Amino acid sequence: MKKNIIFFIITIFIILFLIGGILIYKSAFSILSVDNTKKSEIIKTDLGDEFLFKYEYSDFPDSQTNVNILDKKNNKEIAYFVVEDKLYKANLINLINTAEIRCYEVYDMLIYSVNNYNFECADINQIYEMDPAEYQSLVQICKALVNRNEWKWVKACAKFLMNTGDSDIVNRLQNYANGQFTQEEIKTNKNSEITKEDMKSFSKQLLDTE
């Protein structure tokens, strides 16, 4: 009888110990996740466009911020992406402003509109993989970006434009492959991390694979 009572008491202690451990683990997990801090801000550009940025930050298991961008005028979602580390404030850069085109850069994304249609987005690092037939408005954006003579945009857009049969980009790449750069291009890219040798090598490689 006494053995049964002792066994019962030990069992109760073990159960309580396990429950306590689970509660401590849940509490620690909750502290680490920092309850997914949420913030939002409205950014109005000099061109009159308004965007709503929504941020949701978490540092468990890794530090990251989920970002939603909406067109404030129609409340339509334009982009969703994840930024590693904590995000404090968006930096929206105006790249193109013409009668037909609006284009902004934010993080590694392009936010653009052609002929006053709804804003769309493209991951700058993925443009080379995109199908021009599915992203026809992006063709105009890429042509305009390349015409800025910044090698950053040539590298991002060249393959995409080549897939449209664009002769201008082919001619530009052929010049680069031969080491021919205009003074305007050299001046525009004097502070760029991308060098003439980089562009020469990039152009040769791209032309050889097409």
Image: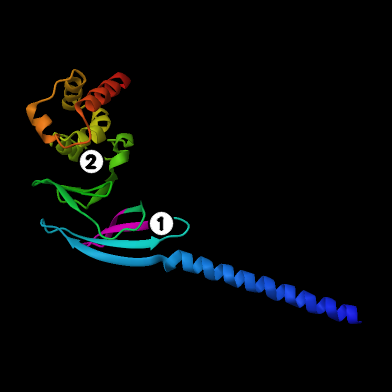
Can you tell which mark lies on residue 167?
none
Q: Nearer the viewer, residue 141 or 202?
A: 202
- From the viewer's perspective, is the residue at label 1 or at label 2 nearer? 1
Whether pointer 1 and pointer 2 mark residues with C-beta atoms closer than 8 Å, the reply is no
Q: Residue at x 89, y 78 (%)?
A: 3
Above or below, comparing residue 16 to residue 196 in the picture: below
User: Horizontally, is 156 left or right of 29 in the view?
Assistant: left
Q: Residue at x 17, y 20 (%)?
A: 179
Q: Nearer the viewer, residue 34 or 3?
A: 3
Q: Position of residue 133 (x, y in %)?
A: 28, 36
Q: Give, as a three-letter code, the residue at label 1.
A: Ser
Quarter of the image containing the N terminus? Answer: bottom right
Q: Position of residue 184 (x, y in %)?
A: 8, 31
Q: Is residue 64 magenta?
A: yes
Mark 2 secondary-structure assignment: helix
When asked about the image quadrant of residue 80, the answer is: bottom left
Q: Is residue 16 magenta?
A: no
Q: Position of residue 12 (x, y in %)?
A: 75, 77
Residue that numbered label 1 is attached to = 63
Q: Position of residue 91 (x, y in %)?
A: 22, 54
Can you tell which mark lies on residue 138?
2
Q: Residue at x 18, y 23 (%)?
A: 176
Mark 1 secondary-structure assignment: loop
Above or below, comparing residue 16 to residue 89 in the picture: below
Question: Residues in magenta?
Answer: 63-79
Q: Is residue 147 visible?
A: no
Q: Give, as a three-letter code, the residue at label 2.
A: Leu
* Magenta stretch: dominant secondary structure: strand
